Amino acid sequence: MAKRPLQLTLNGQTVASAEVADDLPMIDYLHEYQNLTGSRLGCGQGICHACVVIVDHPDGSSEQVRTCITGAHWFDGKRVRTIEGHATRDAKGEVSALNPIQQKFVERFAFQCSYCAPGFVNAATVLLEKAQRQPLKKSELESAIEDSLGQHICRCTGYVRYYDATREVLSDLGLVREG
């Protein structure tokens, strides 16, 4: 099997170049090469979105990308955030604070089994960051949440708590304006 170098920035750290098989899915690279198992392999077909990571672009925007159907080499040279990269850590590497989305999901008991939670956290984080750049109009809030979270599948909660928690974070941070 053909291999070639892969280098990227992962959760703020440059990852040393590694020889990676041409056809290796990113989810396998994260699990096998980086020991980052928070992104979940659900359907393996790009339908459930449990495997979503965030790709940060040079212009400050970001997007959620499914890793089960996207080859690792697509991420070459890119800045990638996984669920492991959201929380603030102290000097010992211990989690000292969750990001606002994670914290609200915990407070609202948004997940049960948590299998889909990493994808939902990443999707809601992308929406939060978009709203930080350009606040959302109140009249567009529900469609923005649906656009961000609507393709994610959860078999436990019925989605209401994920949506409520996301709505609450956006409102609490003043990212929703009249209109």
Image (spheres, grey):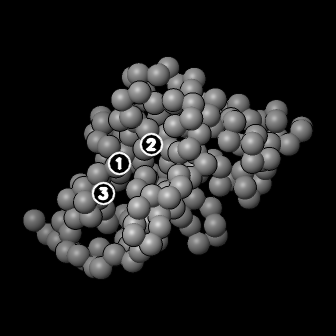
Callout 2 touching callout 1 (CB < 8 Å): yes
Q: Which mark is residue 39?
A: 1
> Residue 12 placed where, x, y %?
46, 71
Indicate the quadrant where residue 31 lies: bottom left
> Residue 43 placed where, x, y %?
30, 34
Which residue in the protein does label 2 denote? 119
Give the quadrant of the N terminus: bottom left
Callout 1 touching callout 3 (CB < 8 Å): yes
Q: Is residue 28 visible?
A: yes
Give the quadrant of the C terminus: top right
Q: Helix, strand, or loop for circle 1? A: loop
Which residue in the protein does label 3 denote? 36
Q: Nearer the viewer, residue 140 or 105?
A: 105
Horizontal side of 16 relative to 157 (left or right) equals left
Distance of mark 1 from mark 3, alpha carbons? 7 Å
Q: Is residue 136 visible?
A: no
Q: Nearer the viewer, residue 105 or 137?
A: 105
